[in-house]
Amino acid sequence: MPFPRVAPGPFRADQIREGDPYELSDGHAIYCAPAGHRHGGTQNAGASALASDPAVDGRVSIDVGIAFNDNKNLRAPDLIVTDNSPLQPGWLRTVPPLAVEYADIGQDEAELAAKISELLTLGVRYIWVVRLNGPLRVEVHVRGEPVRILRADDTLTAPGVLQNPLPVRALVDPATSRAVTLHNLLQQHGYTSIAEIQAESHATGKLEGKLEATAASILTLLQLREIAVPPAAAATIRASHDLEQLERWLRRALTVTTADELLA
């Protein structure tokens, strides 16, 4: 159980500046240490996989402070899914439906328990605690229900928040996260696979031959990932007559962040 505090403490959320390493629990300041390498690295995989879910549509925030309880509480989960309200400066004042915490070596379990309790009381529907120390597992916290533990090969669901099931590994493993992200992005545009895009290109008669279909798949995938492709780069891709090169570019299009990086 969390260590009992004399409530309320003297601090309020408007006294904490963005970037200060503190959260608040009923007015008491809690120091938040920097994340370790494993903690921070896996967090990026989880953010990408969650943000690509069609029901989420990119509305995932990292380390955003949520102010509540008359400003006496300020909590910043590692990841949250938010509503579609416009982004505003300052602390979040609405209740996220899903929060994710990553717990590794040195985790203060009493403070984590207090944070989970406060967020559930606030109205967060699902809290996932990703345990990185020891065998990979995720604790699923839902108010009024027993805690469920899912293992590395299990699948998470969040009805009413996520459209698609999420493999536990997608929260920590970049390769699994990329596969989930690609599937979700294709699904948002009505496709189930890259092969389906290629087949559609042939069926519509817009492109002829495998070279053209592969080039079109590359450009479509970059577009789905919202990566800008300058006209010169698009022309280079379309003009290539090297099928092996095009197929290498197609594989690289899953991970690059710019068109220049693809062609380098």
Image: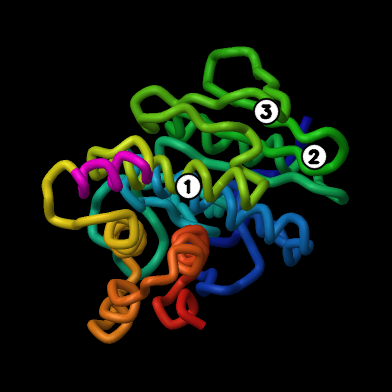
In the picture, the disc for residue 80 is 1
Give the prevailing secondary structure in the magenta stretch.
Answer: helix
Could you say which is closer to the camera, residue 199 or residue 16?
Answer: 199
| C-alpha distance separating marks 1 and 2 | 20 Å
Look at label 3 and name its amino acid.
Answer: Glu
Residue at image x 23%, y 82%? 231
Residue at image x 30%, y 66%? 88
- Secondary element at tag 2: helix
Q: Which residues are magenta?
A: 194-202
Look at label 1 and name its amino acid.
Answer: Ile
Q: Label 2 belongs to which residue?
A: 109
Disc 1: CA contacts within 10 A as few (<14), some (14-19) or many (>=20): many
Give the mark nearest the N terminus, 3 or 1: 1
Q: Label 3 belongs to which residue?
A: 139
Could you say which is closer to the camera, residue 174 or residue 138?
Answer: 174
Could you say which is closer to the camera, residue 33 or residue 211?
Answer: 211
Give the mark nearest the N terminus, 2 or 3: 2
